[in-house]
Image (tube, grey):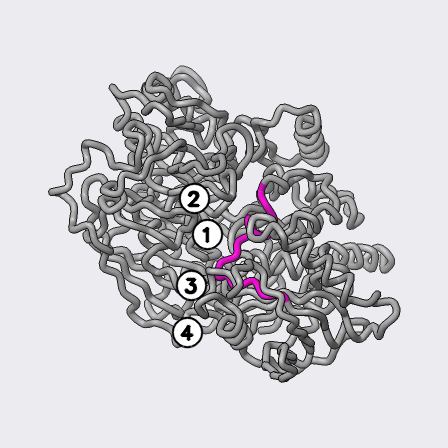
Amino acid sequence: MRPPSAFQLLRHRAQGIRRYASVTDRPRIPQTVIEKVVQKYAVGLPEGKVVKAGDYVMIRPQHVMTHDNTGPVISKFNSIGATNIFNPSQPVFTLDHDVQNKSPKNLQKYATIEAFARKHGVNFYPAGRGIGHQILVEEGYAFPNTLTVASDSHSNMYGGVGCVGTPIVRTDGAALWATGQTWWQVPRMVKVELKGRLSPGVTGKDVIVALCGSFNHDEVLNAAIEFTGDAIPQLSVDDRLTIANMTTEWGALVGVFPVDDVLLQWYENRLKKLEFRTFASASDSSIPPPPEHPRINRRRLDALRANRLTSDPDAQYSSHLVLDLSTLVPYVSGPNSVKVANPLPVLQASHIAINKAYLLSCTNARASDISAAAAVIKGHKVAPGVQFYVAPASSEVQAEAEQNGDWATLLAAGAKPLPAGCGPCIGLGTGLLEEGEIGISATNRNYKGRMGHPKAQAYLASPAVVAASAVKGFIAGPDSLDPSSLPPASPPTFSIVNPTSSSRSSSVSAPKEAALPGFPTSFSGPLLFAPQDNLNTDGIYPGKYTYQDDITLERQAEVVMENYDPAFASLVATLRKDHINDDTSSSSATKHGIILVSGYNFGTGSSREQAATALKSVGIPLVIAGSFGDIFKRNAINNGLVCVECPELVADLTAEFAKDGVRGKGGKDGELTVDKGVSIDVKAVDGRVDVIWPNGEKKSYNVGSVGASVQELWLCGGLEGFVLKSIQAQSAAQ
């Protein structure tokens, strides 16, 4: 199913309703639980349409969360001419990323966001309340069998409570505020079966670190994961949240656990906590009952028990992965890659000294995590020369940790407290890794440069291992970890039951479409090759610039790819000066610029749209890769940067120019970005790429064509321009 023409953003606005398709009224077509949830939240479907993987659908999610990036979304909302929030109960604002920044500029930014929320009646959580993802779980915005999106890559975390959570980007956020809906392509479905029992001392963090390290060839890239298996009941909800959270690093767009008795009991306990949060004694019959929470309440829980969604027995999956948890020991990820994972006993024997340790983030800073770290560190002190930073996932988590004494235990050992928020995990505030330092963290992402200096090394591990490492001064497990109770320190048993023919994206020639008037039939210019798979958004656009809302496009162009290749921007500028003519003096049918080619999973990582706008600003109108991270591709499409997949070209460039003929080592001459005088002409609509090699040889490659929907967004300057055009057209018709 092709995307609706121009995504039809506003066609159904006047209806003002979400049409819930009836499972019993339509023909019997098997669906996964994820497809069933999306069916509930899809709008404007043709009569009888059953949502399946691969479909482009318009969705009206239950909620949409934005955090510190709410400021830029407000700017986009205003710039498209919108004046009212379509459904004020749909957005949620949570300030969590740069909460340590007390500068007048940042405080004014936060005040502006709060004022906008009050003006439009939007739910708002100020700095200090906690990390947005944690708040959405605590307050029921992420709820089982619902669809909630967020302008942040770790919205996958909502799958830990059976909610289909998936990331959107800032431009989508503005479109959702204005119209209540946006477009989405339903990902391919992957079943991940967890079987066996975890050994004592092995946690949910170890499970996801092992999954990332074992299945590290894009098996779940851009997929929606459904977790199943006999091991699920033994996993606590906190473990599930950790695993779902890091399915983002694994490459997936969704990671959902089932709604089972463990989850339902967690909600029963949560309901009691909410009642006691309001009254000192919720059971006292002499006072009125506590007010009903708007999202976590008895009526909603009873309805959930009575109507649990499950996958049909014959639902279709593109792949079925299996991990035997009984063969798993504690695992550590890194350095500087989640795709590199080693058994803890192996690293502990290497005695890797650390400078900093971190217990924070939306991944592992809940009350159970803090308690696990406190149990390890009690009676000890942080090792000399080591700084141990701790921050709760939310103010509620900190209150619970303070009440049971765990917070005091950590501080007494020498841990340094930080406010509830993202902080060092995103590379902001106190405690960042400096050049040459080594850190171990309970966070979710250890890309080069993310938590500090690009020449630092970052490892990821469970809270208990982080705390033990902070005490011992090197990467190590807690003394309570009994080696005799663990399986052998070797890779866990894992398998693919029914692998697809290729786990990577492949170029499939789509039916040819005519170019819309004004859309270039050709993108032409010098070719630059970045021989690197998984070139992430931190490498493309460093996190330290992400929340500088007033940064100009010119400045973005100066810092693009800084964490990957500091010389990249100047190289592009030189090539543009020497080879690119002003488009105004040439045919509008050809768009001249520098064409960047890279490896697989290009743009993986966070949801920052500047990774796309910075590339476009530096003079790159089109990027070719073996495959793209879906969030990056979404940002690119929404901002008019064309993306084309061509694995064959990537393979040829790798063989010709990459060191040792493999990606990840730079070019043959040691350069990170290869410039060997190759020129390229991309017929984006025809689906053909012509490359002229340095020896004059010409070779052509077939690729998927750029369809009318993407062309129209490009002509409008992106989704923001299209929504503006649509609103103006609607106003003119009234």
Q: Position of residue 233 (x, y in %)?
A: 26, 48
Q: Secondary structure at mark 4?
A: loop
Q: Which quadrant of the rendered structure holds the C terminus?
A: bottom right
- Distance between the alpha carbons at the discs numbered 2 and 1: 9 Å
Q: Give left or right: position of 525 versus 567.
A: right
Q: Residue shown at 48%/67% (left/top)?
A: 53
Nearer-N-terminus badge (4/1): 1
Q: Secondary structure at mark 1?
A: helix
| Res 218 label | 3
- Marks 4/1 in contact by CB < 8 Å: the verdict is no
Q: Which residues are magenta?
A: 528-543
The residue at which mark 2 appears reads as 444
The residue at which mark 1 appears reads as 248
- Distance between the alpha carbons at the discs numbered 4 and 1: 21 Å
- Marks 4/3 in contact by CB < 8 Å: the verdict is no
- Distance between the alpha carbons at the discs numbered 3 and 1: 12 Å
Q: Nearer the viewer, residue 233 or 662?
A: 662
Nearer-N-terminus badge (2/3): 3
Q: Disc 3 marks which amino acid?
A: Asp
Q: Position of residue 458 (x, y in %)?
A: 42, 42
Nearer-N-terminus badge (3/1): 3
Give the class, few, some or many, for how many residues have Cα within 10 Å of label 4's Cα (few <14, many ≥20): few
Q: Residue shown at 77%/64% (left/top)?
A: 578
Residue 454 magenta-highlighted = no
Q: Position of residue 404 (x, y in %)?
A: 32, 20
